Image (cartoon, rainbow, N blue to C red):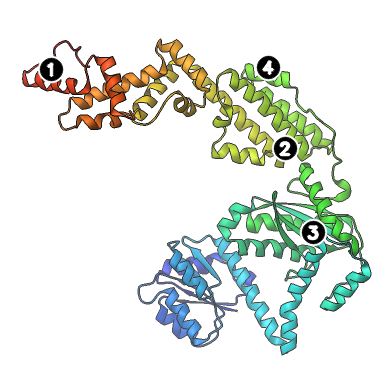
Amino acid sequence: MHLLIVDDDIATVDLIRHTVDWEALSIDKVEAAYSAAQARRILQRGKTDIVISDIEMPQGSGLDLLTWVRQQGLEVEFLLLTCHERFDYAASALKLDAAEYLTKPFDPRIMALSLQKTVAAIREKHRLREGSRYGTWRMENLQREEINFWLSLYNGGQPRSREQIRGEIEARGLPIDPDRPYRLVVTRIADSEPRAQELGQALLHYILENAHARHLLDRDDNTRAIRRFGPNGLWYFTAADDRPDAELRERCARVIAACGEAARVKATCCIGRACAIEALSDQPVTLQKLLERSVVYYGQAFTQTEAIAVGEETQVLEIDRLKDMLMRYDKVTLLNTLKEALASRTALRTLSERTLHIVQQELLQVVYAYLADAGVQAPRLFADEDSVRLSDQACRSSLDMIRWANYLIERTFAYDAEMRKTGSLVERIHQFIHEHYQENIGRNEVAAEFHLAPEYLAKLFKKKTDQSLKDAIREYRVEQAKRMLRDPEVRVGDVAGAVGFDSFSYFSTIFKRETGMTPQEYRRDHETGRQGGAGEPAGMPAEE
Protein backbone atom coordinates (compact mmCIF):
# COMPACT_ATOMS: atom_id res chain seq x y z
CA MET A 1 0.00 0.00 0.00
CA HIS A 2 1.01 3.62 -0.60
CA LEU A 3 0.62 6.41 1.96
CA LEU A 4 0.98 10.19 1.64
CA ILE A 5 1.75 12.56 4.54
CA VAL A 6 0.56 16.15 3.97
CA ASP A 7 1.69 18.88 6.36
CA ASP A 8 3.37 22.27 5.93
CA ASP A 9 5.45 21.54 9.05
CA ILE A 10 8.53 19.54 8.01
CA ALA A 11 9.19 18.42 11.61
CA THR A 12 5.72 16.84 11.86
CA VAL A 13 6.21 15.00 8.56
CA ASP A 14 9.57 13.64 9.72
CA LEU A 15 8.12 12.63 13.10
CA ILE A 16 5.34 10.60 11.47
CA ARG A 17 7.79 9.05 8.98
CA HIS A 18 10.10 7.80 11.73
CA THR A 19 7.56 6.93 14.43
CA VAL A 20 5.24 4.46 12.69
CA ASP A 21 6.27 0.86 11.90
CA TRP A 22 5.20 0.92 8.24
CA GLU A 23 6.37 -2.61 7.53
CA ALA A 24 4.13 -4.03 10.25
CA LEU A 25 1.18 -2.29 8.58
CA SER A 26 2.13 -3.61 5.10
CA ILE A 27 2.64 -0.05 3.85
CA ASP A 28 5.56 -0.26 1.43
CA LYS A 29 5.76 3.33 0.19
CA VAL A 30 5.50 6.59 2.17
CA GLU A 31 5.59 9.96 0.38
CA ALA A 32 5.38 13.51 1.69
CA ALA A 33 3.78 16.74 0.47
CA TYR A 34 4.19 20.12 2.14
CA SER A 35 1.13 21.82 0.65
CA ALA A 36 -2.33 20.87 -0.62
CA ALA A 37 -1.26 21.72 -4.19
CA GLN A 38 1.73 19.36 -4.04
CA ALA A 39 -0.51 16.67 -2.54
CA ARG A 40 -3.03 17.01 -5.41
CA ARG A 41 -0.27 16.44 -7.97
CA ILE A 42 0.81 13.24 -6.20
CA LEU A 43 -2.79 12.03 -5.77
CA GLN A 44 -3.54 12.51 -9.48
CA ARG A 45 -1.18 9.62 -10.22
CA GLY A 46 -3.88 7.40 -8.67
CA LYS A 47 -1.56 5.16 -6.64
CA THR A 48 -2.20 6.47 -3.10
CA ASP A 49 -4.28 4.40 -0.66
CA ILE A 50 -4.07 6.47 2.55
CA VAL A 51 -3.49 10.17 3.28
CA ILE A 52 -2.47 11.58 6.66
CA SER A 53 -3.14 15.32 6.39
CA ASP A 54 -3.01 18.34 8.65
CA ILE A 55 -6.25 20.32 8.56
CA GLU A 56 -4.77 23.78 9.12
CA MET A 57 -2.35 24.71 6.31
CA PRO A 58 -1.83 28.21 4.89
CA GLN A 59 -2.39 27.39 1.20
CA GLY A 60 -5.40 25.08 1.20
CA SER A 61 -6.61 23.12 4.23
CA GLY A 62 -6.75 19.38 4.73
CA LEU A 63 -10.55 19.57 4.53
CA ASP A 64 -10.26 21.33 1.16
CA LEU A 65 -7.94 18.55 -0.02
CA LEU A 66 -10.36 15.86 1.20
CA THR A 67 -13.26 17.63 -0.56
CA TRP A 68 -11.26 17.69 -3.81
CA VAL A 69 -10.44 13.96 -3.46
CA ARG A 70 -14.12 13.10 -3.03
CA GLN A 71 -15.05 15.28 -6.02
CA GLN A 72 -12.45 13.49 -8.14
CA GLY A 73 -13.86 10.12 -7.12
CA LEU A 74 -10.49 8.92 -5.83
CA GLU A 75 -10.71 5.96 -3.47
CA VAL A 76 -8.38 7.21 -0.76
CA GLU A 77 -8.76 6.89 3.02
CA PHE A 78 -8.04 10.07 5.04
CA LEU A 79 -6.67 10.53 8.56
CA LEU A 80 -6.95 14.19 9.53
CA LEU A 81 -4.69 15.93 12.08
CA THR A 82 -5.44 19.17 13.92
CA CYS A 83 -4.16 21.16 16.89
CA HIS A 84 -7.71 22.08 17.95
CA GLU A 85 -10.67 19.89 18.89
CA ARG A 86 -13.28 21.94 17.02
CA PHE A 87 -16.79 20.64 16.44
CA ASP A 88 -16.99 22.12 12.92
CA TYR A 89 -13.79 20.29 11.93
CA ALA A 90 -15.06 16.99 13.33
CA ALA A 91 -18.45 17.47 11.65
CA SER A 92 -16.84 18.21 8.27
CA ALA A 93 -14.51 15.21 8.62
CA LEU A 94 -17.49 12.98 9.36
CA LYS A 95 -19.49 14.38 6.45
CA LEU A 96 -16.59 13.78 4.05
CA ASP A 97 -16.13 10.21 5.32
CA ALA A 98 -12.67 10.63 6.86
CA ALA A 99 -11.36 7.41 8.42
CA GLU A 100 -10.06 9.12 11.58
CA TYR A 101 -9.81 12.59 13.17
CA LEU A 102 -6.77 12.93 15.47
CA THR A 103 -5.49 15.85 17.54
CA LYS A 104 -1.89 17.07 17.78
CA PRO A 105 0.44 16.34 19.37
CA PHE A 106 -0.56 12.90 18.15
CA ASP A 107 -0.12 9.75 20.23
CA PRO A 108 2.02 7.30 18.14
CA ARG A 109 0.12 4.37 19.61
CA ILE A 110 -3.28 5.78 18.63
CA MET A 111 -1.90 6.73 15.20
CA ALA A 112 -0.71 3.12 14.65
CA LEU A 113 -4.05 1.69 15.79
CA SER A 114 -5.96 4.07 13.51
CA LEU A 115 -3.76 3.08 10.57
CA GLN A 116 -4.20 -0.61 11.40
CA LYS A 117 -7.97 -0.17 11.34
CA THR A 118 -7.80 1.79 8.07
CA VAL A 119 -5.57 -0.81 6.38
CA ALA A 120 -7.99 -3.56 7.45
CA ALA A 121 -10.91 -1.62 5.95
CA ILE A 122 -9.05 -1.15 2.64
CA ARG A 123 -8.22 -4.85 2.48
CA GLU A 124 -11.85 -5.74 3.08
CA LYS A 125 -12.94 -3.45 0.24
CA HIS A 126 -10.40 -5.06 -2.10
CA ARG A 127 -11.55 -8.52 -1.10
CA LEU A 128 -15.18 -7.72 -1.75
CA ARG A 129 -14.38 -6.18 -5.11
CA GLU A 130 -12.76 -9.38 -6.32
CA GLY A 131 -16.01 -11.40 -6.22
CA SER A 132 -18.96 -11.45 -8.58
CA ARG A 133 -21.99 -9.28 -7.93
CA TYR A 134 -23.63 -12.05 -5.92
CA GLY A 135 -20.31 -13.00 -4.37
CA THR A 136 -19.82 -9.40 -3.27
CA TRP A 137 -23.24 -9.35 -1.67
CA ARG A 138 -22.51 -12.67 0.04
CA MET A 139 -19.18 -11.49 1.44
CA GLU A 140 -20.65 -8.22 2.68
CA ASN A 141 -23.51 -9.96 4.45
CA LEU A 142 -21.99 -13.25 5.58
CA GLN A 143 -20.07 -11.73 8.50
CA ARG A 144 -23.13 -9.80 9.66
CA GLU A 145 -25.31 -12.92 9.28
CA GLU A 146 -22.95 -15.04 11.37
CA ILE A 147 -22.70 -12.42 14.12
CA ASN A 148 -26.51 -12.15 14.16
CA PHE A 149 -26.77 -15.94 14.44
CA TRP A 150 -24.54 -16.12 17.52
CA LEU A 151 -26.27 -13.09 19.01
CA SER A 152 -29.68 -14.76 18.64
CA LEU A 153 -28.27 -17.90 20.25
CA TYR A 154 -27.11 -15.98 23.35
CA ASN A 155 -30.26 -13.88 23.68
CA GLY A 156 -32.13 -16.79 25.25
CA GLY A 157 -35.82 -17.17 24.61
CA GLN A 158 -37.27 -20.56 23.73
CA PRO A 159 -34.70 -23.41 23.82
CA ARG A 160 -33.84 -24.71 20.34
CA SER A 161 -32.94 -28.24 19.36
CA ARG A 162 -29.88 -29.02 17.31
CA GLU A 163 -32.06 -29.71 14.29
CA GLN A 164 -33.73 -26.30 14.62
CA ILE A 165 -30.31 -24.68 14.85
CA ARG A 166 -29.08 -26.69 11.87
CA GLY A 167 -32.04 -25.46 9.84
CA GLU A 168 -31.28 -21.85 10.78
CA ILE A 169 -27.61 -22.26 9.83
CA GLU A 170 -28.56 -23.71 6.45
CA ALA A 171 -31.17 -21.02 5.83
CA ARG A 172 -28.59 -18.32 6.51
CA GLY A 173 -25.93 -20.18 4.50
CA LEU A 174 -23.37 -20.00 7.30
CA PRO A 175 -20.09 -21.97 7.47
CA ILE A 176 -20.89 -23.32 10.96
CA ASP A 177 -20.80 -27.00 11.95
CA PRO A 178 -23.69 -27.68 14.37
CA ASP A 179 -22.36 -31.14 15.27
CA ARG A 180 -19.03 -30.11 16.77
CA PRO A 181 -18.56 -29.09 20.44
CA TYR A 182 -17.86 -25.46 21.35
CA ARG A 183 -16.45 -23.67 24.38
CA LEU A 184 -17.83 -20.26 25.22
CA VAL A 185 -15.22 -17.72 26.32
CA VAL A 186 -16.68 -14.79 28.28
CA THR A 187 -14.43 -11.73 28.63
CA ARG A 188 -15.03 -8.91 31.09
CA ILE A 189 -13.41 -5.57 30.17
CA ALA A 190 -12.58 -3.15 32.99
CA ASP A 191 -11.96 0.60 32.57
CA SER A 192 -13.51 0.70 29.10
CA GLU A 193 -15.22 4.10 29.48
CA PRO A 194 -12.04 6.23 29.85
CA ARG A 195 -10.45 4.36 26.94
CA ALA A 196 -13.55 4.87 24.79
CA GLN A 197 -13.27 8.62 25.42
CA GLU A 198 -9.57 8.55 24.52
CA LEU A 199 -9.72 6.29 21.44
CA GLY A 200 -13.34 6.68 20.36
CA GLN A 201 -15.85 3.86 20.79
CA ALA A 202 -15.54 2.55 17.23
CA LEU A 203 -11.75 2.18 17.44
CA LEU A 204 -11.88 0.63 20.92
CA HIS A 205 -14.46 -1.95 19.83
CA TYR A 206 -12.43 -2.74 16.71
CA ILE A 207 -9.31 -3.37 18.82
CA LEU A 208 -11.12 -5.64 21.28
CA GLU A 209 -13.02 -7.60 18.62
CA ASN A 210 -9.86 -7.97 16.56
CA ALA A 211 -8.01 -9.37 19.60
CA HIS A 212 -10.69 -12.04 20.14
CA ALA A 213 -10.93 -12.94 16.44
CA ARG A 214 -7.16 -13.29 15.95
CA HIS A 215 -6.28 -15.18 19.11
CA LEU A 216 -9.39 -17.31 19.71
CA LEU A 217 -10.61 -17.89 16.14
CA ASP A 218 -7.42 -17.51 14.05
CA ARG A 219 -9.21 -14.97 11.85
CA ASP A 220 -8.58 -11.40 10.76
CA ASP A 221 -12.30 -10.60 10.62
CA ASN A 222 -14.66 -11.03 13.56
CA THR A 223 -17.55 -13.47 13.13
CA ARG A 224 -18.14 -14.77 16.66
CA ALA A 225 -17.05 -12.22 19.30
CA ILE A 226 -20.35 -10.69 20.43
CA ARG A 227 -20.22 -7.40 22.34
CA ARG A 228 -22.62 -6.55 25.15
CA PHE A 229 -22.85 -3.69 27.63
CA GLY A 230 -23.96 -4.49 31.16
CA PRO A 231 -24.21 -2.82 34.58
CA ASN A 232 -20.73 -4.14 35.37
CA GLY A 233 -18.97 -3.00 32.23
CA LEU A 234 -18.25 -4.24 28.73
CA TRP A 235 -18.48 -7.97 27.92
CA TYR A 236 -17.51 -10.20 24.99
CA PHE A 237 -18.92 -13.68 24.27
CA THR A 238 -16.91 -15.82 21.84
CA ALA A 239 -17.81 -19.38 20.78
CA ALA A 240 -14.35 -20.94 20.43
CA ASP A 241 -13.67 -24.36 18.97
CA ASP A 242 -13.18 -27.10 21.57
CA ARG A 243 -9.49 -27.25 22.50
CA PRO A 244 -7.52 -28.46 25.54
CA ASP A 245 -7.67 -26.24 28.64
CA ALA A 246 -3.98 -25.35 28.44
CA GLU A 247 -4.25 -24.19 24.83
CA LEU A 248 -7.36 -22.10 25.47
CA ARG A 249 -5.76 -20.53 28.55
CA GLU A 250 -2.74 -19.59 26.46
CA ARG A 251 -4.95 -18.14 23.70
CA CYS A 252 -6.96 -16.16 26.26
CA ALA A 253 -3.70 -14.88 27.76
CA ARG A 254 -2.85 -13.49 24.31
CA VAL A 255 -6.29 -11.84 24.13
CA ILE A 256 -5.71 -10.26 27.56
CA ALA A 257 -2.23 -9.06 26.54
CA ALA A 258 -3.50 -7.62 23.24
CA CYS A 259 -6.31 -5.74 25.01
CA GLY A 260 -3.84 -4.33 27.54
CA GLU A 261 -1.18 -3.33 25.01
CA ALA A 262 -3.42 -1.87 22.31
CA ALA A 263 -6.28 -0.40 24.33
CA ARG A 264 -4.87 -0.23 27.88
CA VAL A 265 -7.86 -2.03 29.38
CA LYS A 266 -7.87 -4.91 31.86
CA ALA A 267 -9.50 -8.08 30.50
CA THR A 268 -10.47 -11.23 32.42
CA CYS A 269 -11.54 -14.42 30.61
CA CYS A 270 -13.65 -17.34 31.82
CA ILE A 271 -13.53 -20.45 29.61
CA GLY A 272 -16.69 -22.55 29.69
CA ARG A 273 -16.90 -26.33 29.53
CA ALA A 274 -17.20 -27.98 26.13
CA CYS A 275 -20.83 -28.31 25.12
CA ALA A 276 -23.09 -28.94 22.14
CA ILE A 277 -24.20 -25.91 20.15
CA GLU A 278 -27.77 -26.12 21.50
CA ALA A 279 -26.43 -25.83 25.09
CA LEU A 280 -24.50 -22.60 24.44
CA SER A 281 -27.53 -20.43 25.17
CA ASP A 282 -27.35 -21.40 28.87
CA GLN A 283 -23.68 -20.47 29.19
CA PRO A 284 -23.51 -16.62 29.11
CA VAL A 285 -25.34 -15.95 32.39
CA THR A 286 -23.55 -18.80 34.19
CA LEU A 287 -20.09 -17.69 33.11
CA GLN A 288 -20.83 -14.01 33.79
CA LYS A 289 -21.70 -14.87 37.39
CA LEU A 290 -18.51 -16.89 37.73
CA LEU A 291 -16.47 -13.95 36.43
CA GLU A 292 -18.16 -11.49 38.77
CA ARG A 293 -17.42 -13.52 41.87
CA SER A 294 -14.03 -15.02 40.93
CA VAL A 295 -12.07 -11.84 41.65
CA VAL A 296 -9.03 -13.94 42.52
CA TYR A 297 -8.54 -14.37 38.75
CA TYR A 298 -8.85 -10.65 37.93
CA GLY A 299 -6.80 -9.90 34.80
CA GLN A 300 -6.24 -13.61 34.09
CA ALA A 301 -7.85 -16.52 32.23
CA PHE A 302 -9.47 -19.44 34.07
CA THR A 303 -11.76 -22.34 33.24
CA GLN A 304 -15.26 -22.98 34.50
CA THR A 305 -14.01 -25.92 36.58
CA GLU A 306 -11.40 -23.67 38.24
CA ALA A 307 -13.94 -21.04 39.26
CA ILE A 308 -14.45 -20.67 42.97
CA ALA A 309 -17.43 -22.10 44.78
CA VAL A 310 -19.90 -19.67 46.33
CA GLY A 311 -18.76 -19.07 49.89
CA GLU A 312 -21.01 -18.89 52.93
CA GLU A 313 -18.94 -16.29 54.81
CA THR A 314 -20.88 -13.61 56.63
CA GLN A 315 -17.89 -12.04 58.39
CA VAL A 316 -14.27 -11.65 57.31
CA LEU A 317 -12.67 -9.15 59.71
CA GLU A 318 -13.02 -8.82 63.49
CA ILE A 319 -14.92 -5.59 64.10
CA ASP A 320 -13.62 -5.07 67.65
CA ARG A 321 -10.00 -5.44 66.48
CA LEU A 322 -10.60 -2.92 63.70
CA LYS A 323 -12.07 -0.45 66.21
CA ASP A 324 -9.06 -0.88 68.48
CA MET A 325 -6.62 -0.25 65.59
CA LEU A 326 -8.48 2.90 64.59
CA MET A 327 -8.47 4.19 68.15
CA ARG A 328 -4.70 3.62 68.26
CA TYR A 329 -4.13 5.25 64.84
CA ASP A 330 -2.48 1.96 63.80
CA LYS A 331 -2.91 2.04 60.04
CA VAL A 332 -0.02 -0.38 59.34
CA THR A 333 -1.45 -3.18 61.49
CA LEU A 334 -4.93 -2.59 60.12
CA LEU A 335 -3.80 -2.85 56.49
CA ASN A 336 -1.62 -5.88 57.25
CA THR A 337 -4.63 -7.59 58.85
CA LEU A 338 -6.64 -6.88 55.71
CA LYS A 339 -3.87 -8.15 53.43
CA GLU A 340 -3.54 -11.39 55.42
CA ALA A 341 -7.30 -12.02 55.27
CA LEU A 342 -7.36 -11.51 51.50
CA ALA A 343 -4.13 -13.45 50.87
CA SER A 344 -5.35 -16.54 52.75
CA ARG A 345 -8.55 -16.62 50.71
CA THR A 346 -6.61 -16.04 47.50
CA ALA A 347 -4.38 -19.02 48.28
CA LEU A 348 -7.45 -21.20 48.88
CA ARG A 349 -9.16 -19.82 45.76
CA THR A 350 -12.16 -18.70 47.83
CA LEU A 351 -11.81 -14.93 47.40
CA SER A 352 -14.99 -13.73 45.72
CA GLU A 353 -16.67 -10.45 44.87
CA ARG A 354 -19.11 -11.21 47.70
CA THR A 355 -16.20 -11.60 50.14
CA LEU A 356 -14.78 -8.23 49.09
CA HIS A 357 -18.21 -6.64 49.47
CA ILE A 358 -18.40 -7.96 53.06
CA VAL A 359 -14.92 -6.56 53.77
CA GLN A 360 -15.92 -3.18 52.36
CA GLN A 361 -19.04 -3.02 54.53
CA GLU A 362 -17.07 -4.02 57.64
CA LEU A 363 -14.50 -1.29 57.07
CA LEU A 364 -17.18 1.32 56.37
CA GLN A 365 -19.10 0.31 59.49
CA VAL A 366 -16.08 0.80 61.72
CA VAL A 367 -14.84 4.00 60.06
CA TYR A 368 -18.29 5.64 60.01
CA ALA A 369 -18.81 4.84 63.71
CA TYR A 370 -15.37 6.21 64.55
CA LEU A 371 -16.04 9.45 62.67
CA ALA A 372 -19.55 9.78 64.11
CA ASP A 373 -18.04 9.79 67.62
CA ALA A 374 -15.93 12.74 66.46
CA GLY A 375 -19.01 14.49 65.06
CA VAL A 376 -17.91 13.99 61.44
CA GLN A 377 -20.52 13.22 58.79
CA ALA A 378 -18.66 10.48 56.93
CA PRO A 379 -20.80 10.34 53.74
CA ARG A 380 -19.90 13.97 53.04
CA LEU A 381 -16.23 13.40 53.79
CA PHE A 382 -16.07 10.58 51.22
CA ALA A 383 -18.16 12.18 48.48
CA ASP A 384 -15.18 13.46 46.46
CA GLU A 385 -14.33 12.04 43.03
CA ASP A 386 -11.35 9.94 44.21
CA SER A 387 -13.34 8.39 47.07
CA VAL A 388 -16.24 7.44 44.80
CA ARG A 389 -13.97 6.01 42.09
CA LEU A 390 -11.87 3.91 44.49
CA SER A 391 -14.99 2.70 46.31
CA ASP A 392 -16.62 1.62 43.04
CA GLN A 393 -13.51 -0.35 42.07
CA ALA A 394 -12.82 -1.88 45.51
CA CYS A 395 -14.66 -5.17 44.89
CA ARG A 396 -12.85 -5.81 41.60
CA SER A 397 -9.75 -7.42 43.09
CA SER A 398 -7.77 -7.73 46.32
CA LEU A 399 -5.36 -5.05 45.07
CA ASP A 400 -8.23 -2.63 44.43
CA MET A 401 -9.63 -3.37 47.91
CA ILE A 402 -6.29 -2.63 49.58
CA ARG A 403 -5.90 0.55 47.53
CA TRP A 404 -9.37 1.76 48.60
CA ALA A 405 -8.86 0.76 52.26
CA ASN A 406 -5.55 2.64 52.40
CA TYR A 407 -7.23 5.77 51.00
CA LEU A 408 -10.17 5.39 53.42
CA ILE A 409 -7.98 5.07 56.52
CA GLU A 410 -5.49 7.72 55.42
CA ARG A 411 -8.25 10.26 54.79
CA THR A 412 -9.99 9.36 58.06
CA PHE A 413 -6.86 9.83 60.17
CA ALA A 414 -5.83 13.02 58.36
CA TYR A 415 -9.22 14.66 58.80
CA ASP A 416 -9.56 13.49 62.39
CA ALA A 417 -6.15 14.94 63.22
CA GLU A 418 -7.12 18.24 61.63
CA MET A 419 -10.39 18.38 63.56
CA ARG A 420 -8.63 17.63 66.84
CA LYS A 421 -6.74 20.89 66.42
CA THR A 422 -9.69 22.75 67.93
CA GLY A 423 -8.01 26.13 67.73
CA SER A 424 -7.34 25.58 64.08
CA LEU A 425 -10.96 24.52 63.51
CA VAL A 426 -12.35 27.61 65.24
CA GLU A 427 -10.06 29.80 63.14
CA ARG A 428 -11.26 28.07 59.98
CA ILE A 429 -14.90 28.56 61.02
CA HIS A 430 -14.27 32.28 61.53
CA GLN A 431 -12.52 32.39 58.15
CA PHE A 432 -15.52 30.70 56.52
CA ILE A 433 -17.87 33.25 58.10
CA HIS A 434 -15.68 36.12 56.88
CA GLU A 435 -15.73 34.77 53.33
CA HIS A 436 -19.43 33.84 53.16
CA TYR A 437 -21.26 36.26 55.49
CA GLN A 438 -23.01 37.83 52.47
CA GLU A 439 -24.68 34.48 51.71
CA ASN A 440 -27.53 32.69 53.46
CA ILE A 441 -25.39 30.76 55.95
CA GLY A 442 -26.21 29.20 59.30
CA ARG A 443 -24.90 26.30 61.34
CA ASN A 444 -26.02 23.73 58.72
CA GLU A 445 -24.00 25.38 55.96
CA VAL A 446 -20.93 25.82 58.17
CA ALA A 447 -21.18 22.20 59.37
CA ALA A 448 -21.45 20.93 55.79
CA GLU A 449 -18.25 22.77 54.88
CA PHE A 450 -16.35 20.84 57.56
CA HIS A 451 -18.25 17.52 57.19
CA LEU A 452 -19.46 17.79 60.81
CA ALA A 453 -22.87 17.22 62.37
CA PRO A 454 -24.53 20.64 62.93
CA GLU A 455 -25.27 19.92 66.63
CA TYR A 456 -21.69 18.79 67.25
CA LEU A 457 -20.23 21.84 65.50
CA ALA A 458 -22.48 24.27 67.40
CA LYS A 459 -21.59 22.76 70.79
CA LEU A 460 -17.87 22.68 69.99
CA PHE A 461 -17.85 26.32 68.83
CA LYS A 462 -19.80 27.46 71.90
CA LYS A 463 -17.48 25.55 74.22
CA LYS A 464 -14.31 27.04 72.72
CA THR A 465 -15.47 30.64 72.12
CA ASP A 466 -18.21 31.13 74.74
CA GLN A 467 -20.33 32.45 71.86
CA SER A 468 -22.98 30.76 69.75
CA LEU A 469 -22.31 30.28 66.06
CA LYS A 470 -25.44 32.27 65.24
CA ASP A 471 -24.21 35.21 67.32
CA ALA A 472 -20.78 35.06 65.69
CA ILE A 473 -22.30 35.29 62.20
CA ARG A 474 -24.64 38.13 63.25
CA GLU A 475 -21.85 40.03 64.98
CA TYR A 476 -19.60 39.89 61.92
CA ARG A 477 -22.43 40.99 59.63
CA VAL A 478 -23.12 44.02 61.85
CA GLU A 479 -19.41 44.93 61.86
CA GLN A 480 -19.38 44.82 58.06
CA ALA A 481 -22.59 46.86 57.94
CA LYS A 482 -20.98 49.55 60.12
CA ARG A 483 -18.00 49.63 57.78
CA MET A 484 -20.28 50.11 54.75
CA LEU A 485 -22.41 52.76 56.50
CA ARG A 486 -19.27 54.82 57.10
CA ASP A 487 -18.83 54.98 53.32
CA PRO A 488 -20.98 57.88 52.00
CA GLU A 489 -20.97 56.33 48.51
CA VAL A 490 -23.01 53.32 49.74
CA ARG A 491 -26.78 53.75 50.00
CA VAL A 492 -28.23 52.81 53.38
CA GLY A 493 -30.92 50.71 51.67
CA ASP A 494 -28.28 48.55 49.95
CA VAL A 495 -26.43 47.56 53.10
CA ALA A 496 -28.83 44.87 54.39
CA GLY A 497 -28.59 42.66 51.30
CA ALA A 498 -24.85 43.24 50.98
CA VAL A 499 -24.17 41.76 54.43
CA GLY A 500 -26.51 38.77 54.18
CA PHE A 501 -29.85 39.96 55.58
CA ASP A 502 -33.05 39.06 53.73
CA SER A 503 -34.98 42.20 54.66
CA PHE A 504 -34.07 45.74 55.64
CA SER A 505 -36.53 45.80 58.56
CA TYR A 506 -34.97 42.71 60.16
CA PHE A 507 -31.51 44.15 59.53
CA SER A 508 -32.53 47.42 61.22
CA THR A 509 -33.85 45.53 64.25
CA ILE A 510 -30.64 43.53 64.66
CA PHE A 511 -28.42 46.55 63.98
CA LYS A 512 -30.18 48.66 66.62
CA ARG A 513 -30.03 45.82 69.14
CA GLU A 514 -26.25 45.55 68.61
CA THR A 515 -25.36 49.27 68.35
CA GLY A 516 -28.20 51.17 70.01
CA MET A 517 -28.86 53.01 66.74
CA THR A 518 -30.76 52.44 63.52
CA PRO A 519 -28.65 52.26 60.35
CA GLN A 520 -29.85 55.75 59.36
CA GLU A 521 -28.89 57.18 62.76
CA TYR A 522 -25.47 55.53 62.54
CA ARG A 523 -24.92 57.08 59.10
CA ARG A 524 -25.98 60.56 60.28
CA ASP A 525 -23.90 60.43 63.44
CA HIS A 526 -20.89 59.24 61.47
CA GLU A 527 -21.32 62.06 58.93
CA THR A 528 -21.66 64.61 61.77
CA GLY A 529 -18.58 63.26 63.48
CA ARG A 530 -16.60 63.39 60.24
CA GLN A 531 -17.66 66.98 59.59
CA GLY A 532 -16.74 67.91 63.16
CA GLY A 533 -13.36 66.25 62.80
CA ALA A 534 -14.13 63.42 65.22
CA GLY A 535 -13.29 59.87 64.28
CA GLU A 536 -16.47 58.42 65.88
CA PRO A 537 -19.87 59.76 66.90
CA ALA A 538 -20.31 60.65 70.54
CA GLY A 539 -21.23 57.80 72.79
CA MET A 540 -19.96 55.16 70.33
CA PRO A 541 -16.96 52.94 71.02
CA ALA A 542 -14.01 53.48 68.73
CA GLU A 543 -13.92 51.07 65.79
CA GLU A 544 -10.86 48.96 65.27
Numbered mark located on residue 398 in the image: 2
**Does residue 456 appear to the left or right of 116 in the view shown?**
left
The residue beneath circle 1 is 535
Residue reaching furthest to the left: 532
Q: Secondary structure at mark 1?
A: loop
Label 4, label 2: how far apart the Cα atoms are: 23 Å
User: Mark 2 is on which residue type?
Assistant: Ser
- Where in the figure is residue 106, as x and y percent of width and height? 50, 61
Name the mark nearer the viewer: 2 or 3. 2
Pick whichever of labels 2 and 3 is earlier in the sequence. 3
Pick whichever of labels 4 and 2 is earlier in the sequence. 4
Pick whichever of labels 1 and 4 is earlier in the sequence. 4
User: Mark 1 is on which residue type?
Assistant: Gly
114 over 524 or under it: above or below: below
Label 1, label 2: how far apart the Cα atoms are: 70 Å
The residue beneath circle 4 is 324
Q: Secondary structure at mark 3?
A: helix
Labels in figure, total: 4
Tell me, yes or no, whether the two marked residues, 4 and 2, touch with CB atoms within 8 Å.
no
Pick whichever of labels 3 and 4 is earlier in the sequence. 3
Numbered mark located on residue 475 in the image: none
User: Mark 4 is on which residue type?
Assistant: Asp
**Does residue 151 appear to the left or right of 47 in the view shown?**
right
Residue sitting nearer the eye, 47 or 78: 78
Numbered mark located on residue 251 in the image: 3
User: Mark 3 is on which residue type?
Assistant: Arg
- Where in the figure is residue 171, as x and y percent of width and height? 85, 78
Q: Quadrant of the N terminus?
A: bottom right
Name the mark nearer the viewer: 1 or 2. 1
Pick whichever of labels 1 and 2 is earlier in the sequence. 2
